[in-house]
Structures are given as C-alpha cells and as structure tokens.
Amino acid sequence: MTVYLVGAGPGDPGLLTARALELIGHAEVIVHDRLIPASALAGARADAELIYAGKEGGGPSMAQSEIDRLLIDHGRAGRSVVRLKGGDPFVFGRGGEEAEALRDAGVAFEVVPGVTAGVAGPAYAGIPVTHRDAASAVAFITGHEDPAKLESALDWEALARFPGTLVIYMGVRRLGAIAERLIAGGRDPFEPAALVERGTLPEQRVATGTLGTIAAEGAAAGIRAPALAVFGAVAGLRERLQWFERRPLAGLRVAVTRARMQASGLSARLRGLGASVIEAPAIRIVSLDGPAPEIGRYDLVCVSSPNGVRLLFERLGAAGLDARALAGARVAAIGPGTATALRERGVIADVVPERFLAEGLVDALADLPIRRALIARAAEARDVLPDALRGRGAEVDVLALYETVAEPLGDAELAALDRADYLTFTSSSTVRFFMAAVGDRLPAGARIASIGPVTSAALREHGLEADVEATRHDIDGLVAALVQAATR
C-alpha cells in the first residue's frame, strides 16, 4: 500500500482539497498533526486508527524518528496510511524528511499538497503576498530553524535586500530579533508589517505596524503562536482589502444543537458568514426498523423532514425499489429542505407550503381530494397533519421512520457553550434534550435563536424566550435571522 503525505491546509476546513478529503475517507491509519482543521477527521472511517503526532513548543511532542517509524511500519504492513499535516507537507512541514525516510525504507509514498498558511493567512487578513504595483516576489522564511544547527542557514543581510514580501513562519517568539537583523541589514524600518494569528480561523487576529514597531505592536495585542509575520509594502494594503472581519457574523460564537450528522450544513453556513461554531449536538437520530411501505396504496405521500426522505428511500431501496415507486402518488414536503432532499433522489414535490409547519401543510392540502395518505416522519412528531387529514375523511397511515434520542454533552462541549453568544435550536426536540443535558448550566448571557414558532413554544415550556425567531422556518431562515440580528 501507499503512505500519503497530505496537506490539511491552514485551518479553515473549507480549504481542504478534494483529494485530501477522499484519502481521509479511505485511510486505515491517519497520523495527524496538531494544526489541522478541527473537522478534518470527521470523514474518517469508523474503524480507522487515528494517531496523534502533534508538536507544540514547550509541550509534549512525538519525536520525528518515532513518526517516521510509525509511517514505515504501517506502510510495510500493507495498510493505507495518511500522514495529515497542517498547511502543505513540503512547506516547513518536515514532509521532505518523512518522504526521504519512506524512500530509504522502500515504502511507496505520494504527496498531496495543501494550501500553505504563508499564502492563506495573509489573504484572509486582506494582504496579497504579491501585487503588481507593490511586490513582484515573495520569500517564505522559517523563524525557527533546527536547534541542532551550528549556525543559521539564513542570510539575513541578503533577505534585508530582497526586493519583495517576506513571510516569516514560526517567528513570533523571535520577532524583535528578526526585525533588528533585517533593519541592521538595510531594510527600511518604516515599511509596513503585519502579524496574523490563527489565520483563516474565526479566531483570527491581526496586528499591524512597521518593521521597526511590529514586535511591540504584536506584544501589546497579545498575539501568540501560531502566527505569521508579513514584511513589505503589501502589508499596507490590509486597511483597504480586509474582508474576513467584515462578514456579518464575524466575531460571534454560535452553538449548533442539532444532530451531529445534520449539523455540518448549518455549521458550514455559519462559518462562511464569519461565526465561530460550537457544535453541541443535543440529539441523535436513530432509524427504526420496518418494511418498505406499499406506496401504490396511497394517493398522497407526505414527508416531514430530510431525515424522513433519507430513511424512506433506504426502506424502499432495501425492497428493490426507487423513486419510481412514488410515480402514482402526489408528494408533499413540509419545507424546502425536505423538497431538496426529494429532488436529490429524483422526486419533485407536488406540494410545498408557504409556511414550513404542519399547519402550513394542512392549509396547502386543503383543496386536494385525498382518500389515502401516508405520512413519513419521526416517531414523536406532532399529530396536527394526520388529525387534520382524518378529519377530512381520509384514511391516514403514519410511518415512523426514526426517533430522536438524547446525545450526552461532554465536559469540553459544556465548557465551550459557556462562551457562546448565540444558541440555535432547530426543533422542539433539540430544546428538550439540550435542556436535559445542561441542567442548570445554561450559558449565561447567550442569546437564543429559534427556527420557528413550534420550537419557540418548546423554549417557553422551559421558561425561556427566543431572542431571535426565523420568519422563514428552515435553516436558510434561521441563518438570515441571525444575520439580521447581528447587523442591527
């Protein structure tokens, strides 16, 4: 088998390459660093062996020789191995050394480049490392050389004369000394400079100044590793080009309480708008066993959620059926998310109400003749729709496809929730199970965002009032309501 030296990018999970995600999903062994995106391992196989090999200045670290041994041993054992490294494995990532060790051991390897922090961090700070009018060259420099070296391999006088941008990795602790050497070598002490901490992440912070002042500016701002220093005229463009901090949810910490497998879409939307997302799933979706329904018996099939769509089609698939089984029935979806899930499986919903509630679906079906209806939903859903249809004389069967159960929150999740600015709730079950999980540890000062009136009613049952309620009762509406509240 092959050992893949994979770059995980600078921190924003959206910058993981498609190839990196593919390999993570297939790997039997993943040896990973500390500075990888928090969700980078979410797509790993359930049986994958995950080995932490991170290094941290002043903290416990795995020796490079031990990392090399792990890669060689697992490679020789015929396992598919991903060595997942922050940024790019061949840019100050010791990937070259690991490749040499694998080559010497006769183990096949491949390299999957990643987006390097030296380009991405400045870009997220509004600093292009090259610019037609300001810099036609860029140099990437390590501020932390091998301590075993007898002398530095860097020619600071030559770097001082370099006609372009200097990007310093791992140089925060030595920033003052680095700036002094560059100035002593003749570099202009008044040229623009910037420090970018945790570049591309929601917690990104930036300090600006000049080459002569940036060390003091960084210290005053409390900038800490991991951080990059940028020296050159391009750093002066930040004031005009900064964009990351101007996104509508920038600086806000938003907790997502929906089920883990559903949370990723909402979390990605929130991160894309600048929020720092705290995933605290209070519920878990558990599918219920049962046969495929005899769809041909019904003239109406109502589906109440994307989960219902997924599990309905799993039952149909187990019986050798597909979307064609629904051809003779009118199909109703409770909202656009459910309609999209149906469309992805080749079914266009005939009815999608304007109000994304059971009551809205009742109104939307008011003028349709219905003799037999199937309602595919969660076991604990409200009976508004089946009761209304039965009241009109229809024969109604309820197909319980799944149930929601409590997902215990760990100490780390509870601690993270204490820092939340907003708690989001997307269903009454998330409210119920979240309150059971946190007990009297409800985060103080956090505002509450509800997806709609049913969820808000559940909040009131627990003595809480929604600060924000979506007008459109779906994920898009919840996100829009958060943006509106944050930008008032």
Image (cartoon, helix red, strand yellow):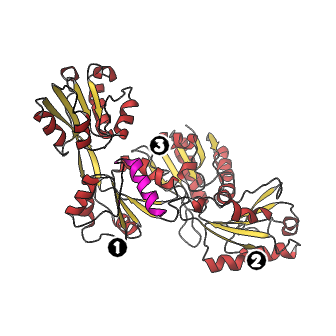
Look at the image and give the residue range highlighted in magenta. Answer: 468-488
Instruction: Name the foreground residue: 19 vs 379.
Output: 379
Amino acid at the residue labelled 2: Ala
- Numbered circle sitting on residue 28: 3
Amino acid at the residue labelled 3: Glu
Instruction: Name the foreground residue: 242 vs 189.
Output: 242
Q: How many marks?
A: 3
- The residue drawn where x is 37% and y is 69% is 446
Residue 272 pos. (x, y %): 52, 53
Q: Is residue 252 magenta?
A: no
Amino acid at the residue labelled 1: Ala
- Numbered circle sitting on residue 444: 1
Nearer to us: label 1 or label 3: 1
Q: Does dot 3 land on a helix, a strand or a loop?
A: loop
Q: CA distance from mark 1 to mark 3?
A: 42 Å
Quadrant position of residue 227: bottom right
Residue 57 pos. (x, y %): 59, 70
- The residue drawn where x is 78% and y is 73% is 211
Q: Which residue is mark 2?
A: 177
Residue found at the far front of this picture: 367
Local crowd size for mark 1, using a 10 Å CA cut-off: few (<14), some (14–19), many (≥20): few
Q: Is residue 352 left or right of residue 225?
A: left
Q: Does dot 1 land on a helix, a strand or a loop?
A: loop
Asked whether residue 316 is in view, the answer is yes
Q: Is residue 98 left or right of residue 367?
A: right
* 2 or 3: tag closer to the N-terminus: 3
